[in-house]
Image: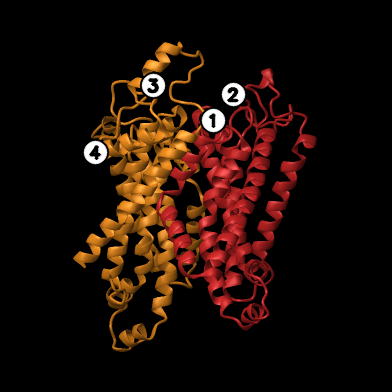
Chain colours: A orange, B red
Amino acid sequence: MLAYTLRRIVGLVPTLFVLVTLAFFIIRLAPGGPFDQEQALAPAIRANLDAAYGLDQPLPVQYGRYLGALLRGDLGPSFRFKDFSVNELIASGLPLSLTTGLAAAALAFLVGVPLGAWAAWRARSRGARLLMNLSLLGVVLPAFVVGPLLALLFGIYWPVFRIGGYEPGNPSFLVLPVITLALPVGAYVARLTRDSMSEVLAMPFIRTARAKGLSSRRVLVHHALRPALIPVVSYLGPAIAFVVTGSLVVETVFGLPGSGRFLVQGAIDRDYPLVMGMILVYGVFTLVCNLVADLLYGWLDPRVRLT
Amino acid sequence: MSAGVRATLIVLAVLAALALAAPWISPWTPDALDWDNLAAPPQWAQAHWLGTDRLGRDLFVRGMQALRISLTLGLLATLVSVCIGVTWGAVAGFVGGRIDAAMMRFVDIVYALPYVFIVIILSTMLPRGSLAALFIAIGAVGWLTMARIVRGQTLSLRQREFVTAAIACGVRTPAILWRHIVPNVATTVIAYATLTIPQVILFESFLSFLGLGVQEPVASLGSLINEGAQEMETSPWMLLVPATLLVTVLVALSVLGDSLRTRVKNGNG
């Protein structure tokens, strides 16, 4: 188990390397640079700027320098946010993004799994069918539609929660963003749980457990839940990636000062180090979550040999 | 065909027809500014059936133009991803061995990267606002799932007698792929392609919402939603119109794709 975990962590390195390399060269291939403005800069100033940021060097040299700095944990200076390093910018927004993202993922799984299990248990009831139809809607509705609608309903027409901005320590600002992020993931989790749970419930060992006279609840929780959770857990990785994507939208919609906006703004401004830094941070985060999902998988299903 | 599927097909057909016919139905053009009706709510009098935006542009016409773009882009980008995905998957699955391992390893690595980042990187690279660039960016990453599915199917097809017979007859590999493999994976591919279309539409809208996709004066459902979200306090229709359109299209296409996929899975496709 430990050896497997270590080997998987080492296995992340080539993937990250490919990510960095691809991102680095593709961004540089783009027309236009960070210092292109409506009024062209004087050539001397331009040359000085390029030299200051090392942009006058050939690409392979820049790439080597970037990798070298990366190994020291330095993501470089931001081109647009003067006097800020990418490390500082990301550190300023990431805690908030992580809080909302993890809260949303937790909410989605904590609500989605019981609802899905219930829908499988009472598959023929009207409530379960309604729930599954609603969940299809939840899966399809994009965050950038749900977010503004929720803001309109619960922020303006019926102002229960605060919207537009963030005051540290006031969770009222975070309720709607977290719900927006959690909705599609929770709906999908509910559907996954329902599908796998109804397969598990049809298996002979469940019939045996019931024949022994165990209570419905015991059968559901102690016998059926664990095998039914396997596909749900393998969705954990993609779910986190989904939440990360959604955070870009949610931070725009609700004006949260998280780190997602840096990716978008950086892409528009051609702020190479900022985009690279964001992609790296989010990339590492996604890959680690995939890894955790795989490890959980082995714990839930002993047939999976983690070697 | 179930009643639900028939209903979604009708909804899609009506929307597509409206999107195509909008220039002839409405007296307004997408970039016409109606100074007397700035941010006007839906009304019959001036033929602003779905209201106007902050600049007095008719929302029905703009919405339909956006829908046209979304549908076209959805179809084109899906086509791109189907072509790449089928070729990649069929070759990997049929040739097998090291080539297969290398090709699928590549897919695995790209798969592990968050999809959005690749699209954002690609969209920064390509000229902003160009539709062609947008669909290349989306199509170029949409093929991964397709490649995996086709490879899986090809692996089992390769074991079948008619393929062995073709190999024994000395048919060359490209011909076998084209004549024997591709027609046999077509049903599955079509079913999954139907599910790819709403994903592509969603992606385009997502990028446009963030300001990385379609640029003014051309409208996309995503950019309309973004504009609407800024005005929703005073003029909620600016948000509700594009949001309803997008959701309707996405739900309809997803229901259609889901039912096709279920049919293929149950073996009566």
Left/right placement of residue B147 relative to residue A273 reads right
Label 4 marks a residue whose chain is A
Label 2 marks a residue whose chain is B
Image quadrant in which the N terminus of chain B is located = bottom right
Return the residue at label 4. Answer: A73
Question: Which mark is on residue A50?
Answer: 3
Return the residue at label 2. Answer: B54
Return the residue at label 1. Answer: B227
Tell me if I can see residue A163 in this picture: no
Disc 1 element: helix
- Residue at 57 percent of width and 55 percent of height: B196
- Give the amino acid type for the residue marked by disc 3 in the picture: Asp
Left/right placement of residue B200 relative to residue A237 reads right
Tell me if I can see residue A219 in this picture: yes
**Distance from Cα at disc 3 to Cα at disc 1:** 36 Å
| Spot occupied by residue A123 in the image (x, y as percentages of width and height) | 46, 72
